[in-house]
Image (cartoon, rainbow, N blue to C red):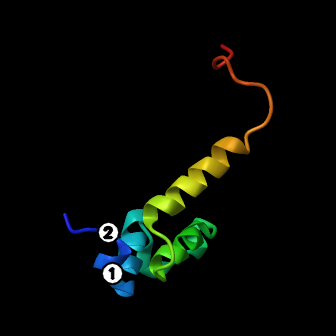
Amino acid sequence: MKSLLIKDTTEEERRRIVEESLGLPGACDDCMGGIADMYDDYIYGKRELREITMSFRTGYTTAMKGPERSGCGY
């Protein structure tokens, strides 16, 4: 498998990597509610995929508030 690092890819390759990974037909982000926008920094060579994914996951888990679920309740 070819490296996905910014230094080893072109902007066009990075755009295609994001589109194929998210299943976007021809960069149609409207149907994904803007989720592809978070990968713009990768496409434009500012941040690696790993950094973007980790910041998203961290923000998601640390933003959780409320009681913890102990099961499905049934």
Q: Can you give x and y, in whole percent of width and height, for residue 14 in the image?
A: 38, 77
Q: Nearer the viewer, residue 16 or 25?
A: 16
Q: Is residue 72 left or right of residue 64?
A: left
Dividing the image into 4 quarters, which one contains the N terminus? bottom left
Residue in the image at 73% along x and 40% along y: 64
Count of numbered circles on the image? 2
To which residue does mark 1 refer? 13
Splitting the image into 4 quarters, where does residue 16 fall? bottom left
Q: Is residue 74 left or right of residue 42?
A: right
Dividing the image into 4 quarters, which one contains the C terminus? top right
Note whether 40 is above or below 61 in the view shown.
below
Q: Residues within 10 Å of mark 1 (few under 14, many from 20)?
A: some
Residue in the image at 33% along x and 78% along y: 7
- Residue 4, label in figure: 2
- Residue 34, label in figure: none
Real-space CA distance between mark 2 and mark 1, rounded to the nearest whole angstrom: 9 Å
Q: Residues within 10 Å of mark 2 (few under 14, many from 20)?
A: some
Note whether 59 is above or below 22 in the view shown.
above
Note whether 60 is above or below 67 in the view shown.
below
Note whether 34 is above or below 73 in the view shown.
below
Q: Amino acid at mark 1?
A: Glu
Q: Residue furthest right?
A: 66
Q: Amino acid at mark 2?
A: Leu
Q: Can you give x and y, in whole percent of width and height, for residue 59 in the image?
A: 66, 51
Q: Secondary structure at mark 1?
A: helix
Q: Residue furthest left?
A: 1
Pair 2/1: label in front: 2
Q: Can you give x and y, in whole percent of width and height, for residue 32 in the image?
A: 57, 66
Q: Secondary structure at mark 2?
A: loop
Q: Residue furthest front?
A: 7
Q: Can you give x and y, in whole percent of width and height, for residue 37 in the image?
A: 58, 73
